[in-house]
Image (spheres, rainbow, N blue to C red):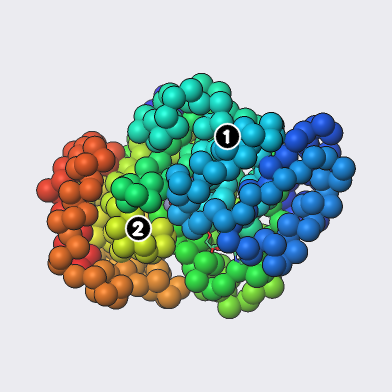
Amino acid sequence: MLNFTFHNPTKIVFGTNAIERIDELLPADARVLILLGGGSARRNGTLGEVRAALGEREVQEFDGIEANPTYETLMRAVEQVRREKLDFLLGVGGGSVIDGSKFVAAAVPFEGDPWQIMLSHGAEVRHALPLASVLTLPATGSEMNCGSVITRHESKTKLAFLNPRVYPVFSILDPTKTYTLPARQIANGIVDAYVHIAEQYLTYPVYGRVQDRFAEGLMQTLIDIGPRCLNETENYELRANMMWVTTMALNGLIGAGVPHDWATHMLGHEITALHEIDHARTLAIVLPSMLQVRRQQKRAKVLQYADRVWQLRDGDEEQRIDQAIRRTAEFFESLGIPTRFSAYGLGTEVIEPLVEQLVAHGMTELGEHRDITPEISRRVYHGAL
Ligand code: NZQ
Ligand code: ZN
Protein backbone atom coordinates (compact mmCIF):
# COMPACT_ATOMS: atom_id res chain seq x y z
CA MET A 1 0.00 0.00 0.00
CA LEU A 2 1.22 3.52 -0.75
CA ASN A 3 1.75 6.13 1.99
CA PHE A 4 -1.18 8.44 2.53
CA THR A 5 -2.84 11.06 4.70
CA PHE A 6 -6.60 10.82 4.87
CA HIS A 7 -8.67 13.66 6.24
CA ASN A 8 -12.18 14.44 5.10
CA PRO A 9 -13.77 17.24 7.12
CA THR A 10 -17.22 17.32 5.45
CA LYS A 11 -20.10 16.53 7.78
CA ILE A 12 -22.78 14.45 6.03
CA VAL A 13 -26.39 14.77 7.18
CA PHE A 14 -28.26 11.98 5.44
CA GLY A 15 -31.95 11.11 5.17
CA THR A 16 -35.46 12.45 4.85
CA ASN A 17 -36.04 15.96 6.17
CA ALA A 18 -32.29 16.51 6.53
CA ILE A 19 -32.73 20.03 5.09
CA GLU A 20 -34.34 21.12 8.39
CA ARG A 21 -30.99 20.54 10.06
CA ILE A 22 -29.38 23.42 8.15
CA ASP A 23 -30.51 25.81 10.87
CA GLU A 24 -28.33 24.17 13.51
CA LEU A 25 -25.38 23.67 11.11
CA LEU A 26 -24.98 27.32 10.09
CA PRO A 27 -23.89 30.24 12.28
CA ALA A 28 -26.93 32.34 13.24
CA ASP A 29 -25.30 35.48 11.88
CA ALA A 30 -24.18 33.96 8.55
CA ARG A 31 -24.84 36.12 5.48
CA VAL A 32 -25.72 33.42 2.98
CA LEU A 33 -25.63 33.19 -0.80
CA ILE A 34 -27.68 30.28 -2.15
CA LEU A 35 -26.26 29.17 -5.50
CA LEU A 36 -28.62 27.48 -7.93
CA GLY A 37 -28.66 25.85 -11.35
CA GLY A 38 -31.18 26.37 -14.12
CA GLY A 39 -34.33 26.20 -12.01
CA SER A 40 -34.99 22.61 -10.89
CA ALA A 41 -34.55 23.37 -7.18
CA ARG A 42 -36.87 26.35 -7.48
CA ARG A 43 -39.53 24.34 -9.32
CA ASN A 44 -39.54 21.23 -7.14
CA GLY A 45 -39.73 22.98 -3.79
CA THR A 46 -36.21 22.27 -2.54
CA LEU A 47 -35.30 25.94 -2.52
CA GLY A 48 -38.38 26.78 -0.46
CA GLU A 49 -37.41 24.17 2.15
CA VAL A 50 -33.87 25.54 2.29
CA ARG A 51 -35.08 29.11 2.73
CA ALA A 52 -37.44 28.01 5.49
CA ALA A 53 -34.58 26.26 7.29
CA LEU A 54 -32.42 29.39 7.05
CA GLY A 55 -35.02 31.33 9.04
CA GLU A 56 -34.26 34.99 9.69
CA ARG A 57 -30.71 34.97 8.32
CA GLU A 58 -29.64 37.39 5.61
CA VAL A 59 -30.07 35.32 2.43
CA GLN A 60 -29.55 36.13 -1.23
CA GLU A 61 -29.78 33.92 -4.30
CA PHE A 62 -27.70 33.44 -7.43
CA ASP A 63 -29.40 31.64 -10.31
CA GLY A 64 -28.22 30.17 -13.55
CA ILE A 65 -25.16 28.01 -12.91
CA GLU A 66 -25.06 25.84 -16.00
CA ALA A 67 -24.47 22.12 -16.29
CA ASN A 68 -20.68 22.24 -16.80
CA PRO A 69 -20.44 25.53 -14.91
CA THR A 70 -18.70 28.40 -16.63
CA TYR A 71 -16.14 30.83 -15.32
CA GLU A 72 -18.04 33.66 -17.00
CA THR A 73 -21.24 32.98 -15.01
CA LEU A 74 -19.45 32.27 -11.75
CA MET A 75 -17.56 35.55 -11.86
CA ARG A 76 -20.95 37.30 -11.61
CA ALA A 77 -21.56 35.41 -8.37
CA VAL A 78 -18.10 36.45 -7.16
CA GLU A 79 -19.06 40.09 -7.76
CA GLN A 80 -22.33 39.67 -5.87
CA VAL A 81 -20.60 38.11 -2.86
CA ARG A 82 -17.98 40.86 -2.75
CA ARG A 83 -20.51 43.65 -3.28
CA GLU A 84 -23.04 42.38 -0.73
CA LYS A 85 -20.42 41.24 1.79
CA LEU A 86 -21.84 37.74 2.00
CA ASP A 87 -19.82 35.23 3.99
CA PHE A 88 -21.29 31.74 3.50
CA LEU A 89 -22.06 29.88 0.25
CA LEU A 90 -24.78 27.24 0.03
CA GLY A 91 -24.94 25.32 -3.24
CA VAL A 92 -28.31 23.68 -3.89
CA GLY A 93 -28.07 21.34 -6.86
CA GLY A 94 -25.91 18.76 -8.58
CA GLY A 95 -22.18 18.60 -9.16
CA SER A 96 -22.19 21.67 -11.37
CA VAL A 97 -23.72 23.92 -8.71
CA ILE A 98 -21.46 22.54 -5.98
CA ASP A 99 -18.35 22.81 -8.16
CA GLY A 100 -19.37 26.34 -9.05
CA SER A 101 -19.81 27.20 -5.36
CA LYS A 102 -16.30 25.93 -4.67
CA PHE A 103 -14.87 28.14 -7.38
CA VAL A 104 -16.71 31.18 -6.02
CA ALA A 105 -15.50 30.32 -2.50
CA ALA A 106 -11.90 30.35 -3.69
CA ALA A 107 -12.25 33.28 -6.10
CA VAL A 108 -13.80 35.82 -3.71
CA PRO A 109 -10.66 36.25 -1.55
CA PHE A 110 -8.25 35.47 -4.42
CA GLU A 111 -5.68 38.14 -5.18
CA GLY A 112 -5.02 38.45 -8.90
CA ASP A 113 -6.79 36.86 -11.86
CA PRO A 114 -9.14 34.13 -10.54
CA TRP A 115 -8.63 32.00 -13.68
CA GLN A 116 -5.21 31.36 -12.17
CA ILE A 117 -7.04 29.11 -9.65
CA MET A 118 -7.76 26.79 -12.56
CA LEU A 119 -4.41 27.18 -14.33
CA SER A 120 -2.62 26.26 -11.08
CA HIS A 121 -5.12 23.40 -10.51
CA GLY A 122 -5.80 24.85 -7.06
CA ALA A 123 -2.21 25.17 -5.88
CA GLU A 124 -2.47 28.97 -5.56
CA VAL A 125 -5.64 28.92 -3.42
CA ARG A 126 -4.69 30.26 0.03
CA HIS A 127 -8.12 31.21 1.38
CA ALA A 128 -11.75 30.32 0.69
CA LEU A 129 -15.14 31.28 2.04
CA PRO A 130 -16.92 28.48 3.90
CA LEU A 131 -19.38 26.57 1.71
CA ALA A 132 -21.93 23.81 2.14
CA SER A 133 -24.26 21.91 -0.15
CA VAL A 134 -27.73 20.45 -0.53
CA LEU A 135 -27.23 17.65 -3.05
CA THR A 136 -30.01 17.04 -5.57
CA LEU A 137 -28.17 14.81 -8.06
CA PRO A 138 -26.05 11.89 -6.86
CA ALA A 139 -23.14 11.54 -9.29
CA THR A 140 -19.94 13.48 -8.89
CA GLY A 141 -19.01 13.16 -5.20
CA SER A 142 -18.44 16.93 -5.15
CA GLU A 143 -20.55 17.11 -1.99
CA MET A 144 -17.78 15.39 -0.03
CA ASN A 145 -14.56 16.20 -1.84
CA CYS A 146 -12.37 19.21 -2.53
CA GLY A 147 -12.43 19.07 -6.32
CA SER A 148 -14.17 21.34 -8.80
CA VAL A 149 -14.35 21.35 -12.59
CA ILE A 150 -14.93 24.66 -14.37
CA THR A 151 -15.26 25.56 -18.05
CA ARG A 152 -14.09 28.79 -19.64
CA HIS A 153 -16.66 29.28 -22.33
CA GLU A 154 -14.68 31.69 -24.53
CA SER A 155 -11.75 29.28 -24.96
CA LYS A 156 -13.65 25.98 -24.55
CA THR A 157 -11.30 25.02 -21.73
CA LYS A 158 -12.51 22.64 -19.03
CA LEU A 159 -10.09 22.35 -16.11
CA ALA A 160 -10.18 20.86 -12.61
CA PHE A 161 -8.83 22.28 -9.38
CA LEU A 162 -8.32 20.64 -6.00
CA ASN A 163 -7.74 22.34 -2.68
CA PRO A 164 -8.59 21.22 0.86
CA ARG A 165 -9.98 24.70 1.65
CA VAL A 166 -13.04 23.99 -0.52
CA TYR A 167 -14.31 20.87 1.18
CA PRO A 168 -17.96 21.61 2.01
CA VAL A 169 -18.42 22.25 5.74
CA PHE A 170 -21.52 20.07 5.56
CA SER A 171 -23.63 18.43 2.88
CA ILE A 172 -27.29 17.54 3.09
CA LEU A 173 -28.10 14.22 1.40
CA ASP A 174 -31.83 13.60 1.26
CA PRO A 175 -32.55 10.76 -1.21
CA THR A 176 -36.11 11.98 -1.78
CA LYS A 177 -34.60 15.04 -3.49
CA THR A 178 -33.61 12.75 -6.38
CA TYR A 179 -37.21 11.79 -7.21
CA THR A 180 -37.63 14.60 -9.72
CA LEU A 181 -34.49 13.69 -11.69
CA PRO A 182 -35.00 12.64 -15.31
CA ALA A 183 -33.81 9.12 -16.17
CA ARG A 184 -30.95 10.57 -18.20
CA GLN A 185 -29.43 12.21 -15.11
CA ILE A 186 -29.85 9.06 -13.01
CA ALA A 187 -28.03 7.08 -15.71
CA ASN A 188 -25.34 9.74 -15.86
CA GLY A 189 -24.88 9.60 -12.09
CA ILE A 190 -24.45 5.84 -12.05
CA VAL A 191 -21.92 5.86 -14.87
CA ASP A 192 -19.94 8.81 -13.48
CA ALA A 193 -19.59 7.14 -10.09
CA TYR A 194 -18.72 3.81 -11.70
CA VAL A 195 -15.90 5.43 -13.63
CA HIS A 196 -14.67 7.26 -10.52
CA ILE A 197 -14.29 3.89 -8.86
CA ALA A 198 -12.66 2.38 -11.95
CA GLU A 199 -10.06 5.15 -12.12
CA GLN A 200 -8.97 4.48 -8.53
CA TYR A 201 -9.11 0.69 -8.86
CA LEU A 202 -8.14 -0.39 -12.39
CA THR A 203 -4.47 0.56 -12.15
CA TYR A 204 -1.78 -1.79 -10.80
CA PRO A 205 -1.76 -3.87 -7.61
CA VAL A 206 -0.35 -2.35 -4.42
CA TYR A 207 -2.17 -4.85 -2.20
CA GLY A 208 -4.61 -2.33 -0.82
CA ARG A 209 -6.99 -5.09 0.11
CA VAL A 210 -9.48 -2.86 1.93
CA GLN A 211 -9.55 -0.31 -0.89
CA ASP A 212 -9.99 -3.08 -3.48
CA ARG A 213 -12.87 -4.71 -1.61
CA PHE A 214 -14.56 -1.37 -1.01
CA ALA A 215 -14.20 -0.48 -4.69
CA GLU A 216 -15.53 -3.85 -5.83
CA GLY A 217 -18.47 -3.58 -3.43
CA LEU A 218 -19.36 -0.12 -4.65
CA MET A 219 -19.21 -1.25 -8.31
CA GLN A 220 -21.33 -4.30 -7.59
CA THR A 221 -23.87 -2.14 -5.80
CA LEU A 222 -24.13 0.14 -8.84
CA ILE A 223 -24.55 -2.87 -11.13
CA ASP A 224 -27.27 -4.23 -8.82
CA ILE A 225 -29.26 -1.04 -8.35
CA GLY A 226 -28.51 0.88 -11.55
CA PRO A 227 -31.25 -0.42 -13.84
CA ARG A 228 -33.86 -0.36 -11.06
CA CYS A 229 -32.91 3.20 -10.08
CA LEU A 230 -33.84 4.24 -13.60
CA ASN A 231 -37.27 2.65 -13.49
CA GLU A 232 -38.34 3.00 -9.86
CA THR A 233 -38.44 6.74 -9.45
CA GLU A 234 -39.64 6.90 -5.86
CA ASN A 235 -37.99 3.84 -4.34
CA TYR A 236 -36.31 5.31 -1.25
CA GLU A 237 -34.13 2.33 -0.51
CA LEU A 238 -32.66 2.34 -4.04
CA ARG A 239 -32.13 6.08 -4.17
CA ALA A 240 -30.55 6.11 -0.69
CA ASN A 241 -28.06 3.49 -1.80
CA MET A 242 -27.34 5.30 -5.02
CA MET A 243 -26.69 8.51 -3.11
CA TRP A 244 -24.30 6.91 -0.65
CA VAL A 245 -22.41 4.93 -3.31
CA THR A 246 -21.85 7.97 -5.49
CA THR A 247 -20.57 9.95 -2.50
CA MET A 248 -18.28 7.14 -1.34
CA ALA A 249 -16.94 6.70 -4.87
CA LEU A 250 -15.09 10.02 -4.73
CA ASN A 251 -14.65 11.19 -1.15
CA GLY A 252 -11.06 10.03 -0.86
CA LEU A 253 -11.70 6.80 1.02
CA ILE A 254 -11.20 4.21 -1.71
CA GLY A 255 -8.43 6.30 -3.28
CA ALA A 256 -6.25 6.55 -0.16
CA GLY A 257 -3.06 4.53 -0.49
CA VAL A 258 -3.62 3.32 -4.05
CA PRO A 259 -2.53 4.65 -7.48
CA HIS A 260 -4.98 6.76 -9.47
CA ASP A 261 -5.48 6.93 -13.21
CA TRP A 262 -7.90 9.83 -14.22
CA ALA A 263 -6.88 9.65 -17.89
CA THR A 264 -10.45 8.71 -18.84
CA HIS A 265 -11.69 11.87 -17.11
CA MET A 266 -9.12 14.08 -18.79
CA LEU A 267 -9.95 12.71 -22.25
CA GLY A 268 -13.64 13.04 -21.43
CA HIS A 269 -13.38 16.67 -20.31
CA GLU A 270 -12.09 17.61 -23.77
CA ILE A 271 -15.09 15.93 -25.40
CA THR A 272 -17.49 17.91 -23.20
CA ALA A 273 -15.63 21.16 -23.83
CA LEU A 274 -15.72 20.79 -27.63
CA HIS A 275 -18.97 18.91 -28.17
CA GLU A 276 -21.12 19.63 -25.10
CA ILE A 277 -21.77 15.99 -24.34
CA ASP A 278 -22.72 15.26 -20.70
CA HIS A 279 -19.73 14.45 -18.49
CA ALA A 280 -20.78 10.85 -17.75
CA ARG A 281 -21.47 10.12 -21.40
CA THR A 282 -17.96 11.14 -22.37
CA LEU A 283 -16.62 8.71 -19.77
CA ALA A 284 -18.76 5.92 -21.21
CA ILE A 285 -17.18 6.63 -24.60
CA VAL A 286 -13.61 6.68 -23.29
CA LEU A 287 -13.37 4.03 -20.56
CA PRO A 288 -13.94 0.82 -22.59
CA SER A 289 -11.45 1.96 -25.21
CA MET A 290 -8.97 3.05 -22.51
CA LEU A 291 -9.13 -0.41 -20.93
CA GLN A 292 -8.58 -2.01 -24.33
CA VAL A 293 -5.57 0.16 -25.16
CA ARG A 294 -4.09 -0.20 -21.64
CA ARG A 295 -4.87 -3.88 -21.14
CA GLN A 296 -1.22 -4.84 -20.63
CA GLN A 297 -0.43 -2.12 -18.09
CA LYS A 298 -3.68 -2.79 -16.21
CA ARG A 299 -3.64 -6.51 -16.71
CA ALA A 300 -3.54 -7.77 -13.11
CA LYS A 301 -6.27 -5.45 -11.90
CA VAL A 302 -8.54 -6.02 -14.91
CA LEU A 303 -8.29 -9.76 -14.31
CA GLN A 304 -9.15 -9.20 -10.64
CA TYR A 305 -12.07 -7.01 -11.76
CA ALA A 306 -13.26 -9.68 -14.19
CA ASP A 307 -13.23 -12.26 -11.43
CA ARG A 308 -14.59 -10.34 -8.48
CA VAL A 309 -17.00 -7.85 -10.05
CA TRP A 310 -18.26 -9.83 -13.05
CA GLN A 311 -17.54 -13.42 -11.86
CA LEU A 312 -15.86 -14.23 -15.19
CA ARG A 313 -13.94 -17.46 -14.74
CA ASP A 314 -14.13 -19.18 -18.13
CA GLY A 315 -11.58 -18.85 -20.91
CA ASP A 316 -7.96 -17.76 -20.87
CA GLU A 317 -6.70 -14.46 -19.49
CA GLU A 318 -7.08 -12.55 -22.76
CA GLN A 319 -10.64 -13.77 -23.16
CA ARG A 320 -11.52 -12.81 -19.58
CA ILE A 321 -10.11 -9.30 -20.10
CA ASP A 322 -12.13 -8.96 -23.32
CA GLN A 323 -15.27 -10.12 -21.55
CA ALA A 324 -14.77 -7.72 -18.63
CA ILE A 325 -14.41 -4.77 -21.00
CA ARG A 326 -17.44 -5.88 -22.97
CA ARG A 327 -19.56 -6.30 -19.83
CA THR A 328 -18.55 -2.81 -18.68
CA ALA A 329 -19.68 -1.27 -21.97
CA GLU A 330 -22.88 -3.34 -21.96
CA PHE A 331 -23.66 -2.11 -18.45
CA PHE A 332 -23.41 1.51 -19.59
CA GLU A 333 -25.48 0.77 -22.69
CA SER A 334 -28.12 -0.98 -20.56
CA LEU A 335 -28.62 2.34 -18.77
CA GLY A 336 -29.24 4.06 -22.09
CA ILE A 337 -25.76 5.55 -22.39
CA PRO A 338 -24.04 4.88 -25.73
CA THR A 339 -20.34 4.03 -25.61
CA ARG A 340 -19.25 5.03 -29.12
CA PHE A 341 -18.67 8.42 -30.75
CA SER A 342 -20.80 7.34 -33.71
CA ALA A 343 -23.91 7.14 -31.52
CA TYR A 344 -23.47 10.85 -30.76
CA GLY A 345 -23.11 11.72 -34.43
CA LEU A 346 -19.32 12.18 -34.21
CA GLY A 347 -16.67 10.59 -36.45
CA THR A 348 -12.94 10.55 -37.17
CA GLU A 349 -12.87 14.30 -37.76
CA VAL A 350 -13.28 15.01 -34.02
CA ILE A 351 -10.12 13.23 -32.93
CA GLU A 352 -7.31 15.61 -33.91
CA PRO A 353 -8.94 18.67 -32.31
CA LEU A 354 -9.42 16.67 -29.12
CA VAL A 355 -5.78 15.62 -29.06
CA GLU A 356 -4.71 19.21 -29.76
CA GLN A 357 -6.75 20.39 -26.79
CA LEU A 358 -5.14 17.76 -24.55
CA VAL A 359 -1.72 19.03 -25.57
CA ALA A 360 -2.75 22.68 -25.10
CA HIS A 361 -3.89 21.85 -21.56
CA GLY A 362 -0.71 20.00 -20.65
CA MET A 363 -2.43 16.60 -20.58
CA THR A 364 0.55 14.84 -22.14
CA GLU A 365 1.61 12.44 -19.36
CA LEU A 366 -1.58 10.85 -18.11
CA GLY A 367 -2.49 7.67 -16.28
CA GLU A 368 -1.17 5.86 -13.24
CA HIS A 369 2.25 5.49 -14.88
CA ARG A 370 2.26 9.03 -16.37
CA ASP A 371 2.99 7.40 -19.72
CA ILE A 372 -0.20 8.11 -21.67
CA THR A 373 1.17 10.40 -24.33
CA PRO A 374 -0.94 12.29 -26.88
CA GLU A 375 -0.26 9.43 -29.29
CA ILE A 376 -1.79 6.92 -26.89
CA SER A 377 -4.73 9.25 -26.21
CA ARG A 378 -5.28 9.40 -29.97
CA ARG A 379 -5.46 5.60 -30.06
CA VAL A 380 -7.99 5.63 -27.23
CA TYR A 381 -10.21 8.12 -29.05
CA HIS A 382 -9.85 6.09 -32.27
CA GLY A 383 -10.85 2.92 -30.44
CA ALA A 384 -14.12 4.59 -29.43
CA LEU A 385 -15.27 5.62 -32.93
O1 NZQ B 1 -29.64 23.25 -13.47
P1 NZQ B 1 -30.86 22.64 -12.89
O2 NZQ B 1 -32.13 23.27 -13.31
O3 NZQ B 1 -30.76 22.50 -11.38
O4 NZQ B 1 -30.98 21.15 -13.49
C1 NZQ B 1 -29.95 20.20 -13.38
C2 NZQ B 1 -29.10 20.04 -14.64
O5 NZQ B 1 -29.84 20.38 -15.79
C3 NZQ B 1 -30.59 18.85 -13.25
N1 NZQ B 1 -30.98 18.50 -11.88
C4 NZQ B 1 -30.17 18.47 -10.78
N2 NZQ B 1 -30.87 18.04 -9.71
C5 NZQ B 1 -32.14 17.82 -10.14
C6 NZQ B 1 -32.20 18.12 -11.52
N3 NZQ B 1 -33.34 17.99 -12.23
C7 NZQ B 1 -34.44 17.55 -11.57
N4 NZQ B 1 -34.43 17.21 -10.26
C8 NZQ B 1 -33.32 17.32 -9.51
N5 NZQ B 1 -33.31 16.94 -8.23
O6 NZQ B 1 -29.61 17.94 -13.71
C9 NZQ B 1 -28.85 18.56 -14.73
C10 NZQ B 1 -27.38 18.19 -14.59
O7 NZQ B 1 -26.86 18.74 -13.39
P2 NZQ B 1 -25.28 18.78 -13.13
O8 NZQ B 1 -25.08 19.37 -11.79
O9 NZQ B 1 -24.60 19.39 -14.30
O10 NZQ B 1 -24.89 17.23 -13.15
P3 NZQ B 1 -23.78 16.43 -12.38
O11 NZQ B 1 -24.10 16.33 -10.94
O12 NZQ B 1 -23.62 15.19 -13.14
O13 NZQ B 1 -22.47 17.34 -12.48
C11 NZQ B 1 -21.66 17.33 -13.62
C12 NZQ B 1 -20.48 18.28 -13.44
O14 NZQ B 1 -19.62 17.83 -12.37
C13 NZQ B 1 -18.28 17.74 -12.84
C14 NZQ B 1 -18.47 17.44 -14.29
O15 NZQ B 1 -17.30 17.67 -15.04
C15 NZQ B 1 -19.61 18.34 -14.67
O16 NZQ B 1 -19.14 19.65 -14.91
N6 NZQ B 1 -17.52 16.78 -12.03
C16 NZQ B 1 -17.15 17.13 -10.78
C17 NZQ B 1 -16.39 16.31 -9.99
C18 NZQ B 1 -15.96 16.70 -8.63
N7 NZQ B 1 -16.21 17.91 -8.19
O17 NZQ B 1 -15.37 15.91 -7.90
C19 NZQ B 1 -15.94 14.99 -10.44
C20 NZQ B 1 -16.64 14.52 -11.66
O18 NZQ B 1 -15.76 13.62 -12.30
C21 NZQ B 1 -17.03 15.56 -12.64
O19 NZQ B 1 -15.93 15.90 -13.48
ZN1 ZN C 1 -16.64 12.16 -13.17
Q: CA distance from mark 2 to mark 1?
A: 24 Å
Residue 156 rendering spot, x and y as whole percentages: 32, 51
Residue 7 rendering spot, x and y as whole percentages: 57, 28
Let me know if residue 215 appears in the view.
no
Q: Amino acid at mark 1?
A: Ala
The front one of 171 and 368 is 171
Disc 2: CA contacts within 10 A as few (<14), some (14-19) or many (>=20):
many
The front one of 282 and 33 is 33
The answer as to whether callout 2 falls within 8 Å of ligand 1 is yes
Secondary structure found at label 1:
helix
Q: How many marks?
A: 2
Outermost residue on the front side: it is 83
Say above or below: 289 vs 69: below
| Mark 2 or mark 1, earlier in chain | 1
Q: Amino acid at mark 2?
A: Thr
Contact flag, marks 2 and 1 (Cβ < 8 Å): no
Residue depicted at x 36% and y 62% = 276
Disc 1: CA contacts within 10 A as few (<14), some (14-19) or many (>=20):
many
Location of mark 1 (residue): 105
Location of mark 2 (residue): 272
Check residue 140 in the rendering and tell me which mark sits there, or answer none: none
Let me know if residue 70 appears in the view.
yes
Outermost residue on the bottom side: it is 231
Outermost residue on the left side: it is 375
Residue 187 rendering spot, x and y as whole percentages: 49, 68
Query: Which image quadrant: the N terminus?
Result: top left
Q: Quadrant of residue 337?
A: bottom left
Residue depicted at x 83% and y 49% = 53
Left/right placement of residue 10 relative to residue 309 reads: right
Residue 244 rendering spot, x and y as whole percentages: 61, 53
